[in-house]
């Protein structure tokens, strides 16, 4: 049996119901209790938070990598999580406290996928919400992509900001437009948006 399998067999069977709390009909396991349980079993384990990822619509995502370690045996798992409010809606322009809270929630999820600890709490949480499938106007999408690229090539952060503000009105369209850009283009647009905000 591998180290990962042994950890999963042990930790996924633990009942953490006495450590959970309820908020808005959702069940939460606090990061301090979660880490305490993990440290009781695998005290050499550790975690790392990366820099938050900001998107053109001013929402953000955090990520955490947890390393489960015992002696010479170890493995890593990474989890991402949007910065959300108490209704699980993405927060626009989150402050440092909101980012910190999201990181702690992300840590709990990272431990859950790495070890199975408290994973049963999340069952059903990530099921897609049933809603009518929205058709994206391809011509409109391509027009926004072209305008964003033109603004990027001319280093026009204000134009990118205005286009992003327009796209906020249609999150599905914004998501499809955003998919058309590579990581370098996204980073460049993010930089231009920050310059506009700092002016």
Image (cartoon, rainbow, N blue to C red):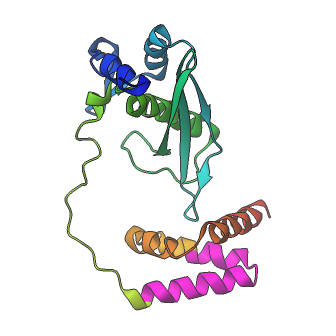
Image position of 65 with respect to 33: above or below: below
182 and 82: which one is in front?
Answer: 182
Count of numbered labels shown in the rendering: 0
11 and 181: which one is in front?
Answer: 11
| Residue furthest out toward the right | 199
Q: Residue at x 34, y 27 (%)?
A: 116
The image quadrant where one finds the C terminus is bottom right
Residue 91 on image: x %, y % = 49, 50
14 and 168: which one is in front?
Answer: 14
Q: Is residue 23 left or right of residue 181?
A: left
The image quadrant where one finds the N terminus is top left
Q: Residue at x 45, y 84 (%)?
A: 141
Image position of 106 with respect to 91: above or below: above
Q: Which residues are magenta?
A: 140-163
Res 34 → quadrant = top left
Residue 120 on image: x %, y % = 26, 29
In the rendered structure, does residue 161 fall within the stretch colored magenta?
yes
In the rendered structure, does residue 59 fall within the stretch colored magenta?
no
Res 139 → quadrant = bottom left
| Residue furthest out toward the front | 1
Residue 198 on image: x %, y % = 78, 60
Q: Residue at x 25, y 32 (%)?
A: 25
| Residue furthest out toward the top | 40
Res 27 → quadrant = top left
Q: Is residue 78 left or right of residue 6?
A: right
Q: Residue at x 54, y 28 (%)?
A: 67
Report the predominant secondary structure element of the magenta stretch: helix
Residue 190 on image: x %, y % = 67, 64
């Amino acid at each position: 049996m591998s180290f990962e399998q042994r950890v999963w067999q042990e930790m996924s069977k633990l009942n953490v119901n006495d450590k959970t709390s309820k908020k808005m009909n959702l069940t939460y396991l606090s990061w301090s209790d979660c880490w305490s349980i993990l440290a009781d079993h695998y005290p050499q384990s550790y975690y790392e938070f990366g820099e938050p990822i900001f998107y053109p619509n001013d929402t953000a995502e955090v990520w955490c990598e947890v390393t489960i370690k015992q002696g010479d045996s170890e493995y890593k798992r990474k989890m991402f999580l949007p910065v959300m409010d108490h209704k699980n809606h993405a927060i626009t322009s989150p402050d440092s406290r909101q980012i910190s809270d999201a990181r702690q929630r992300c840590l709990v999820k990272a431990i859950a996928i790495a070890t199975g600890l408290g994973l049963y709490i999340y069952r059903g949480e990530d099921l897609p919400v049933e809603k009518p499938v929205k058709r994206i106007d391809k011509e409109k999408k391509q027009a926004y992509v072209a305008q964003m690229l033109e603004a990027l090539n001319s280093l026009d952060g204000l134009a990118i900001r205005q286009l992003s503000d327009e796209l906020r009105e249609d999150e599905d369209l914004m998501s499809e437009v955003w998919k058309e850009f590579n990581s370098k283009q996204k980073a460049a647009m993010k930089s231009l948006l920050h310059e506009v905000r700092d002016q």
